[in-house]
């Protein structure tokens, strides 16, 4: 008897999601005769049983579309706002899965989705995931779909900022997404030739950044592009956060833990406008004017790159094969030219950050890029 599968997209949208839905759906239907349905708006659609049939028509013409035809949300199964309170909706999800007599659920998402998927797998559902995010921070996979497209967009932006920075002899501080990981800023910074790259993995000193910019002025280049990750931190911020986290870990009472949490929250709030603050500080430490560009959600929008379409299709079709083989509880990871089924236990809760000795960092330093360290 043929199998029936459900697909959902969860977390921030990412170019390549529709290509992946198409890859799973077309291959599951075409090669194995499976029935395919989609759940709307991530895990919330699964709780509320809002479905869409993914037949031939729905799966056609979506390869090049940005966003997700299913809609998405950041809702977590075990902590979902419902009727004014936050509730654990896992049982409702299990019920929907059983009611539809699903043989597998495919969750397309980033780090948070891997954790949610593991919990559902532990509740007895057969769950497979695909790694999507522009942040490229999912563990155990070479890369994630969405990253290449965002990298192209951020690089193009840095290219364009160069001519205006050059014309006005200004510093342009460009903020790049990536959550707590520096992959996108590092990649776009190198590809776009940013003069300074600031990433969360390398805490920076504002004075060191200013010195690098002044050095460029002395060598006849009175303009600079500073690519700063949204999660980048100064050395002082890094030290304060490490102390706050340590205090939370070692708290001996509920009261102590509460105080440590409040401290962490304050530090996080203080870091929100860090790009504007950095630009102001650089203006006062150098003789140059500074401007800020926040790329924001532009980096997630629009049509996926060819590389992302290819990756999504590879992972999606491999996912259908794994379902047919009876595999579950895995993330379909990209490994070289192939794919690998990695147990969700090895992925959930892990974050792939930029290692200090990553070759990209070495290459950037060798062409004269400052990391502000
Ligand atoms: O995870 C993708 C991402 O775009 C991050 O780079 C960013 O920190 C976050 O999502 C923004 O989330 P939202 O779209 O919910 O504001």
Image (cartoon, rainbow, N blue to C red):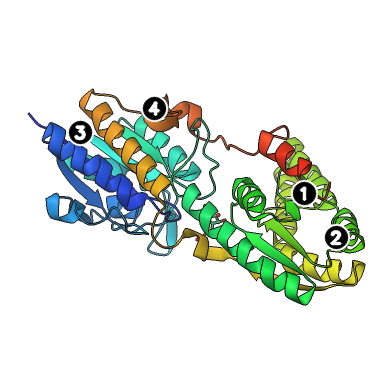
The dot on residue 213 is 2
At label 1, counting other C-alpha atoms closer than 10 Å, the crowd grade (few under 14, some 14-19, many 20 or more) is many
Percent coordinates x, y for residue 127 in the rendering? 32, 34
- How many numbered tags mark residues here? 4
Mark nearer the viewer, 3 or 4 = 4
The answer, for residue 291, to whether it is visible in the render is no
Task: Pick whichever of labels 4 and 1 is earlier in the sequence.
Answer: 4
Q: Is residue 26 visible?
A: yes
Which residue shows up at 89% across the image and 59% down it? 219
Task: Give the spatial CA distance, label 1 vs label 3.
Answer: 51 Å
Dividing the picture into quarters, in which one does residue 176 lie?
bottom right
CA–CA distance in space, label 4 to label 2 = 43 Å
How far apart in space, not on screen, are marks 4 and 1 (Cα)?
A: 34 Å
Q: CA distance from mark 3 to mark 2?
A: 58 Å
The disc, 1 or 3, on the residue closer to the chain's N-terminal end is 3
* Label 4: few (<14), some (14–19) or many (≥20) C-alpha neighbours in 10 Å: few
Residue furthest out toward the left: 1
Of callouts 1 and 2, the N-terminal one: 2
289, above or below 244, in the image? below
* Location of mark 1 (residue): 369
**Which one is closest to the eye, mark 1 or mark 3?**
1
- Which residue is pictured at 79% across the width and 67% down the height? 223
**Sooner in the amino-acid sequence: mark 3 or mark 4:** 3
Q: Which residue is mark 3?
A: 103
* Depicted 86 relative to depicted 336: above or below: below
Find residue 25 and report its image quarter.
Answer: top left
Q: Indicate the quadrant containing the N terminus: top left, top right, bottom left or bottom right.
A: top left
Mark 3 touches mark 2? (CB < 8 Å): no
- Residue at numbered disc 4: 338
Q: In this view of the protein, which residue sits in the foreground, 91 or 327?
A: 327
Mark number, residue 41: none
């Amino acid at each position: 008897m043929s199998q029936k599968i459900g697909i959902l997209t969860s977390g921030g949208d990412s170019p390549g999601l529709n290509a992946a839905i198409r890859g799973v759906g077309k291959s599951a239907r075409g090669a194995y005769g499976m029935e395919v349905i989609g759940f709307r708006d991530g895990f919330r659609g699964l709780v509320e049983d809002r479905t869409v049939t993914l037949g031939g028509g729905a799966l056609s013409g979506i390869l090049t579309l940005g966003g997700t035809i299913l809609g998405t949300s950041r809702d977590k199964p075990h902590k979902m706002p419902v009727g004014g309170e936050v509730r654990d909706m896992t049982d409702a999800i299990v019920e929907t899965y059983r009611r539809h007599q699903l043989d597998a659920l495919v969750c397309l998402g980033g780090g948070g989705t891997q954790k949610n998927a593991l919990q559902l797998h532990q509740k007895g559902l057969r769950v497979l995931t695909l790694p999507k995010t522009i942040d490229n921070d999912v563990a155990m996979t070479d890369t994630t779909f969405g990253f290449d497209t965002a990298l192209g967009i951020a690089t193009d932006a840095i290219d364009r900022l160069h001519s205006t920075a050059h014309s006005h002899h200004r510093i342009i501080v460009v903020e790049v997404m990536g959550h707590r990981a520096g992959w996108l800023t590092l990649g776009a910074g190198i590809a776009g030739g940013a003069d300074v790259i600031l990433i969360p993995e390398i805490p920076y000193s504002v004075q060191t950044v200013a010195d690098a910019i002044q050095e460029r002025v002395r060598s006849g280049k009175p303009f600079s592009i500073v690519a700063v990750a949204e999660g980048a931190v100064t050395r002082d911020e890094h030290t304060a956060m490490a102390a706050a986290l340590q205090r939370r870990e070692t708290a001996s009472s509920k009261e102590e833990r509460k105080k440590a949490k409040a401290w962490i929250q304050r530090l996080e709030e203080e870091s929100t406008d860090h790009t504007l603050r950095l630009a102001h500080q650089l203006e006062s430490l150098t003789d140059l004017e500074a401007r800020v560009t926040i790329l924001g959600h532009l980096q997630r929008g629009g049509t996926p790159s060819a590389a992302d379409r290819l990756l999504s299709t590879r992972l999606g079709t491999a996912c259908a094969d794994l379902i047919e083989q009876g595999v579950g509880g895995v993330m379909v990871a990209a490994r070289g030219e192939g794919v690998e089924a990695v147990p969700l236990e090895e992925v959930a809760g892990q974050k792939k950050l930029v290692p200090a000795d990553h070759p990209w960092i070495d290459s950037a330093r060798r062409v004269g890029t400052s990391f502000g360290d």
